[in-house]
Image (cartoon, grey):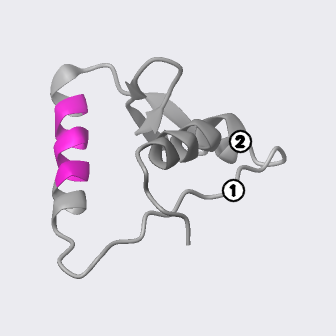
Amino acid sequence: MRYGEEDWEYRSFVGSKWQKIHLAHRQMYLKNAYRVLLTRARQGMVIVVPHGDLDDSTRNPSYYDPIYSYLADLGIKEI
């Protein structure tokens, strides 16, 4: 999942590129998978948002900068 201009976008990495997930039940499955991961931390959690890389089409900074900004706006501290 990645944060787009208006809301979360559901994506799947297939082969060498990201593809949109259109089916509602697959989107819900992905959302629930993240929910499980984010609620299992007992002692703390580290969320890694990688630096974008213009030379790597799978790591375009426009994918990661909005996620970083969203998390920072929520008050999540950078370490």
User: Left or right: where does residue 73 sit relative to residue 1?
Assistant: right
Residue 29 within the segment the image draws in magenta: yes
> In the image, is residue 51 above or below residue 61?
below
Structural distance between the alpha carbons of marks 2 and 1: 7 Å
> In the image, is residue 68 above or below residue 37?
above
Residue under pointer 1: 51
Identify residue type, mark 2: Pro
Residue extending farthest to the front is: 75
Q: Which residue does the image show at 55% across and 57% down from the upper left?
A: 49
Tag 1 secondary structure: loop
Residue extending farthest to the right is: 55
Q: Which residue does the image show at 36% across and 27% down from the upper left?
A: 21
Q: Position of residue 78 (x, y in %)?
A: 55, 64
Badge 2 vs badge 1, beta-carbon distance below 8 Å = yes
User: Left or right: where does residue 35 sit relative to residue 74?
Assistant: left
Residue count near mark 2 (Cα–Cα under 10 Å), binned few <14, some 14–19, many ≥20 = some
Q: Which residues are magenta?
A: 27-35
